[in-house]
């Protein structure tokens, strides 16, 4: 009987002391969640400013300054790509600065006029690739695309690395412009 107890205790101990291995996708999702807000801050442009072409006059200067100071509750549409799909719960990423919506929320509109009409603080569209990690899982990169219209956008390669058990952005390179 004592042998059965011993084996039972060993099995129970082994079961509870083992760490659960996470899948590659779970690992990538954890890293993506950790860096999401910093990647957005590093790559988005406020469509209201980016597409506001200079006009003369004091009224335009006042409008631009007001938009520059209006940095809370900006709406960013997130397109499908990488780990993001229509079922992704974007509200987990919301902050005082940004509210994220699925791009599929509104009908397709290449100039995003429907977004600007519904959300006056619409700042543009972001799409993320999957994160590609090195073999040690200590560094990686992802591509981020920012869109502000049919012929308006920017692309970035965002390089990340692990420093003191935290993921940080080590470099943001522009890759394309339209």
Image: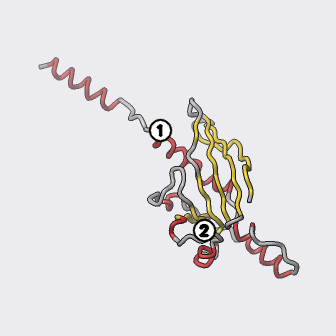
**Residue 127 horizontal side relative to residue 151, left or right:** left
- Residue drawn at x 66%, y 56% as measured from the top left: 41
**Residue 171 horizontal side relative to residue 103, left or right:** right
Residue 61 lies, with reference to residue 128, above or below; the image says below
- Residue drawn at x 63%, y 48% as measured from the top left: 143
Q: Quadrant of residue 97?
A: bottom right
Residue 173 lies, with reference to residue 87, above or below; the image says above
Of residues 97 and 54, the one nearer the viewer is 54
* Cα gap from disc 1 to disc 2, whole angstroms: 31 Å
Mark toward the viewer: 1 or 2: 1
Residue 72 lies, with reference to residue 135, above or below; the image says below
Q: Which of the two labelled residues, at mark 1 and mark 2, occupies the earlier sequence position?
A: 1
Which residue is denoted by mark 2 in the rendering?
75
Report the quarter where the N terminus lies.
top left
From this viewpoint, which residue is outermost toward the top? 3
**Residue 74 horizontal side relative to residue 176, left or right:** left
Q: Position of residue 31 (x, y in %)?
A: 54, 44
Which residue is denoted by mark 1 in the rendering?
24
Q: Is disc 1 surrounded by few (<14), some (14 to 19) or many (20+) residues within 10 Å?
A: few
Residue 55 lies, with reference to residue 126, above or below; the image says below
Q: Is disc 2 surrounded by few (<14), some (14 to 19) or many (20+) residues within 10 Å?
A: many
| Mark 1, secondary structure of its residue | helix
- Residue drawn at x 60%, y 73% as measured from the top left: 115
Of residues 156 and 99, the one nearer the viewer is 156
Q: Position of residue 93 (x, y in %)?
A: 54, 58
């Amino acid at each position: 009987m004592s042998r059965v107890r011993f084996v039972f205790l060993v099995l129970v101990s082994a079961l509870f002391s083992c760490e659960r291995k996470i899948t590659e996708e779970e690992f990538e999702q954890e890293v993506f969640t950790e860096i999401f807000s910093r990647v957005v801050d590093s790559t988005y442009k406020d469509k209201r400013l980016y597409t506001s072409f200079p006009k003369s006059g004091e009224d335009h200067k006042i409008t631009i300054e007001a938009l520059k100071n209006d940095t809370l509750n900006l709406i960013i549409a997130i397109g499908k790509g990488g780990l993001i799909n229509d079922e992704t719960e974007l509200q987990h990423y919301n902050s005082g600065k940004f509210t994220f919506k699925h791009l599929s929320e509104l009908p397709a509109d290449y100039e995003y006029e429907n977004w600007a009409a519904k959300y006056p603080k619409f700042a543009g569209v972001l799409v993320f690739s999957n994160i590609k990690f090195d073999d040690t899982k200590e560094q990686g990169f992802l591509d981020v695309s920012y869109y502000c219209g049919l012929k308006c956008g920017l692309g970035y390669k965002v390089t990340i690395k692990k420093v003191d058990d935290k993921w940080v952005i080590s470099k943001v390179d522009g890759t394309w412009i339209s």
